[in-house]
Amino acid sequence: MSAEHGKAPVLILAVGNPSRGDDALGPLLAARLQDWLGLQHADLQRDVEVITDQQLLVEHVLDLQDRACVLFIDATAQGEAAVSLSAVKLLPRPVPVSTHSSSPTQLLSLYQQLLHATPPTAHLLTLRGHGFELGAPLSEAAQAALPQAWSCLQAWLSDARAILIRS
């Protein structure tokens, strides 16, 4: 099931700054996933790679290469839902990209432009944050959303692995 070049076919790319309150949600969920993966069978460990960074950068385009599917995890200050999972859509024309910070949509567009290939299937798991101040602790609302986000992540991972098995 492993992809070419030794890369795991499933990539979880979690972003956020652990020093900025609820912006830590992505890295916290990624750390829990890494701990959980460490207790699983070797085939699951080979199939899933977890990368954590403070923000999405153009360099992450190379991390998307040779993947079957990708899940981006990030905190958001917008929206009503505590946890949301949505497909990342590829736009019909190129979108501007910043070298300092990018969105999942921008990364997929850049992937297509640079590599002249269709990017992997991608989804975005967002967790509603309430405070992003430097040095702030995780808010109670964000802490309460973590179990729901964990369930959503596990369901997504189960679906991704089922697709891998069929292909």
Image: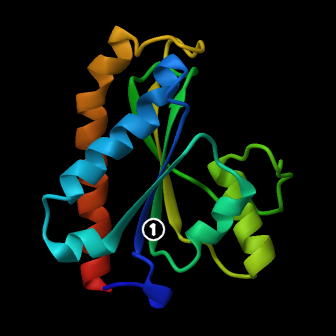
The mark total stands at 1
Q: Label 1, on which residue?
A: 69
Disc 1 packing (10 Å; few <14; some 14–19; many ≥20)? many
Q: Is residue 18 above or below residue 99?
A: above
Can you say which quadrant of the picture contains the N terminus?
Answer: bottom left
Q: Kindly give the residue lying farthest to the right in the view shown.
A: 96
Residue 88 vs 118, above or below: the answer is above
Q: Amino acid at mark 1?
A: Cys
Q: Is residue 77 left or right of residue 114?
A: left
Colour scheme in the image? rainbow
* x 57%, y 53%: residue: 88
Q: Taking 19 as reference, is 116 left or right?
A: right
The residue shown at (37%, 19%) is: 142
Residue 31, quarter of the rendered image: top left
| Residue nearest the observer in this picture, 126 or 87 | 126
Residue positioned 23% across, 41% down in the render: 151
Where 70 falls versus 87 (above or below)?
Answer: below
Q: Is residue 107 left or right of residue 34?
A: right
Under circle 1, the secondary element is strand
Residue drawn at x 40%, y 11% is: 139
Indicate left or right for 113 with 119 as reference: right
Picture coordinates of residue 15 (x, y %)? Answer: 53, 42
Tell me the quarter of the picture where residue 77 sits. top right
Image quadrant containing the C terminus: bottom left
- Residue 67 x %, y %: 49, 75
Q: Position of residue 100 (x, y in %)?
A: 79, 44
* Residue 11: image location, x then y, percent: 44, 64
- 114, above or below 58, in the image: below
